[in-house]
Image (spheres, coloured by chain):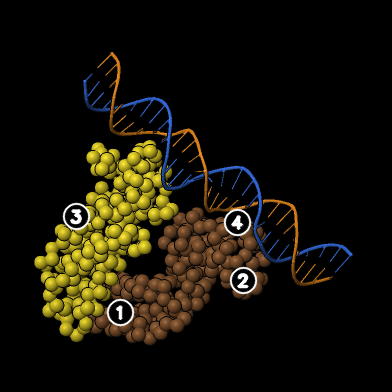
Chain colours: A brown, B yellow, C blue, D orange
Amino acid sequence: MKFINLDDNKRRNILNAAFREFAEKGFEQASTNVIVKEAGIGKGMLFYYFKNKQGLYEYLIEYTLDVIMEDYLQRIDPGERDFIERFKHAARVKMKAFLDHPDLFRFSGTFMLDQESIPDRLKPRMEQLQEMGNKIMYENIDYSLFRDDVDVEKAFRLIRWAIEGYQNEMKQRLYGANFATLDFDPYWKEFDEYLDVLRKSFYS
Amino acid sequence: MKFINLDDNKRRNILNAAFREFAEKGFEQASTNVIVKEAGIGKGMLFYYFKNKQGLYEYLIEYTLDVIMEDYLQRIDPGERDFIERFKHAARVKMKAFLDHPDLFRFSGTFMLDQESIPDRLKPRMEQLQEMGNKIMYENIDYSLFRDDVDVEKAFRLIRWAIEGYQNEMKQRLYGANFATLDFDPYWKEFDEYLDVLRKSFYS
DNA sequence: ATTAAGTCGACCGGGGTGGTCTAAAATTAA
DNA sequence: TTAATTTTAGACCACCCCGGTCGACTTAAT
């Protein structure tokens, strides 16, 4: 394929422009004109590299699934049997991956929710990825750490929701910030404090 | 104003069509053509009732703020000093309000996030509403119920995030369901079980 | 010098936009 | 009944943007 042999910089420009446009507007409302302008290429090239708009979209999804698998899921340590510790470690890995591919991750957030927008040929890979994610996060957990007067499954979910809530708030608080110059240490410190509260509350 | 004197059914049709369209597409991408078609009126009427698209949008926001204030916030009992109990009660009230105005609430979820889209003249009312919301949910809480080995502020937030997470999941699980014929009892039962877990974990 | 690969953006037909305006229908007044 | 008035529907306007094509041009390889 022509596209994958492109100069690295140009390839990334196109990918990121497309990620941003599709993430912001969705498949149908996204404009190939905006993408080429943002990517700094001529209109013709986009349709030289990709069959059409749909082809570009499918390539982006496939690429995204690969990156999420390789740069995120596979780097989580499933040997850590402490649920909260595993989450803590996963949050670090996730943040690293996000900083490496911010546009890609924003894009992933949009199409993962809306199964309709995923072409059939990629659905199996989608499901495989989700199953993998569940395994990596929830398998081989040491149940004995939890207090025994509550349903562990429910505790699981509550902890997950609480952490996701914190992360969403963080996303909003840091919206528009310059990640390159930002010192994350205080945020990780705060995060760990919240994890401590969870540990005190849900563990025995 | 012509609009408020309309037949109740027609008025509601127009409002709901507009709520849905703006909620789905945002202000700029929303189409007045779709709204009039959905509402079952001619194009001319919309611009007879409202000055223009912007005027309609602002009316919707104002209307929404009124409803949220009257049918939601003001019905929460701020006398309940048990944080989780207050949340439990608020969830019921919120669900009732949502069932009465589903399109309106979906609309509210979109414009509340994006302060940019709110016209200046309505910003004070927006802020007033948010302040009111905070007061009603977080003021006059009995701190002594919480276990004393954790920061109460952090526990507050974790509980809120966890409950919001549950509610989001519920929203997804029930997406597309017919609320009219749906029996909510098992869901409330499950919800209360989660609240019990939270109580056991965060209270002393 | 010749071929081939790469690049651009003007251009196409189609379709949707917010908003206006006319003419008919419905309602009210006489 | 007729005349005056208010509501209504949607054809129409000028404009903008769409995905995709195509021929003109540049660059690199042989």
Residue that numbered label 3 is attached to: B71
How far apart are the alpha carbons under marks 2 and 3?
53 Å
B79 lies left or right of A153 = left
Can residue B9 be seen from the camera position used here? Answer: no
Q: Looking at the image, which residue is at 24% across and 72% down?
A: B159
Dot in front, 3 or 1: 3
Badge 4 and badge 1 in a common chain = yes
Instruction: Give residue B149's position: percent from left, percent from top.
Output: 19, 85
Alpha carbon of mark 4 to alpha carbon of mark 3: how far? 49 Å
Residue under circle 2? A10
Residue A59 located left or right of residue B110 = right
Tag nearer the camera, 2 or 4 = 2
| Residue where numbered disc 4 is placed | A52
Quadrant, the N terminus of chain B = top left
* Coordinates of residue A191 in the picture (x, y in percent): 33, 81
**CA–CA distance in space, label 2 to label 4:** 19 Å
The answer to whether residue A122 of the structure is visible from this angle is yes
Mark 3 residue element:
helix
Residue situated in front as seen by the camera: B121 or B64: B121
Q: Are marks 2 and 3 on the same chain?
A: no
Which residue is depicted at the point 31% across and 83% down?
A190
Amino acid type shown at disc 2: Lys
Camera-near label (4 vs 1) is 4
Q: CA distance from mark 2 to mark 1?
A: 49 Å
